[in-house]
Amino acid sequence: MKTNTSDYNITISLDAPAGSVLKDVWQYRHLFYFLAWRDILVRYKQTLAGVAWGVIKPLSTMVVFTLVFGKLADLPSGQAPYGVMVLAALLPWQFFTNILSNTGNSLVSNASLVSKVYFPRVIIPMATVVVALADFLIAFALLAGMMLVYGVWPGMTILLLPGFMAIAILTSLGTGLFVAALNVKYRDFMHLTPFILQFGLYMSPVGYSSSIVPEGWRFIYSLNPMVGVIDGFRWVLLGEIALVYWPGVFMSVVLSMMIFIFGLKFFIRNERDFADVI
């Protein structure tokens, strides 16, 4: 389906397949680099603590969870120190939440850019992944330091870490594209997203091990795609200390691809209205 947009004097494909959209993104890759670099500068340069925020947030959350779940509730952590187990789960969870939050608000935050010039709008939310990746690398350095202190060494399974990161990216980006498109028309989602993420934090095995979930409920519990991602992160980083629930991982792979495809198609379908509504 084609439509002529007089404001930009350009023909835009509204029902373009995902492959052609990604091809358009590649053609506008310089804009992608610019937006990603701009977001990184805004994230770190205009703050007092700078990159320290990438350490403060996961460190403070780890301390609270360790005290509440590890000390007061006395939940098991296997052979791993409780703080290391929690931090290994916080990395993928905060990576997921950063992408989802920033992606969901990206179009509204760049309203002036969206309404003035034409380019593949999907570039804006996709650029937020780079900022989340920067936060992840900073927090990963903190985890590596803690693992060194406690003498916890990853095995060859760490080579699978990019695969679990890819699952997290697909899940968060797909959900974020869906929320970003809705957020243009219904600004309520800007306030609803933090509430959902707060609820999801306790429904995901971040502050505790998923092994405490009864065996009969493990598969249903794994319908949350981040369960398999978090279990996978603990497995690749802590080795045999944290056993992975493979049906949950397979479920996460399938769900992440479905979520990304659905979110991308929903975004593309509604893209033609962004400039007028925003």
Image (tube, rainbow, N blue to C red):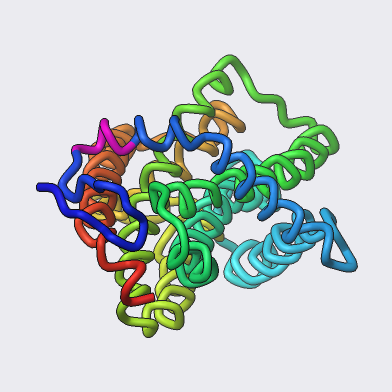
Q: Quadrant of the C terminus?
A: bottom left
In the image, residue 25 above or below residue 67: above
The answer to which image quadrant residue 150 occupies is top right
Report if residue 224 lies within the magenta region: no
Report if residue 19 lies within the magenta region: yes
- Farthest right residue in view: 48
Work out whether residue 85 can be spotted: no
Q: Residue at x 76, y 54 (%)?
A: 41
- Farthest left residue in view: 1
Is residue 55 found left or right of 80 in the rendered image?
A: right
Is residue 156 found left or right of 199 in the rendered image?
A: right
Q: Tell me where residue 111 appears, x and y as whole percent.
A: 49, 70
Q: Tell me where residue 227 appears, x and y as whole percent.
A: 39, 49
Q: Residue at x 49, y 53 (%)?
A: 124
Frontmost residue, 50 versus 278: 278
Is residue 82 found left or right of 54 in the rendered image?
A: left
Q: Which residues are magenta?
A: 17-21
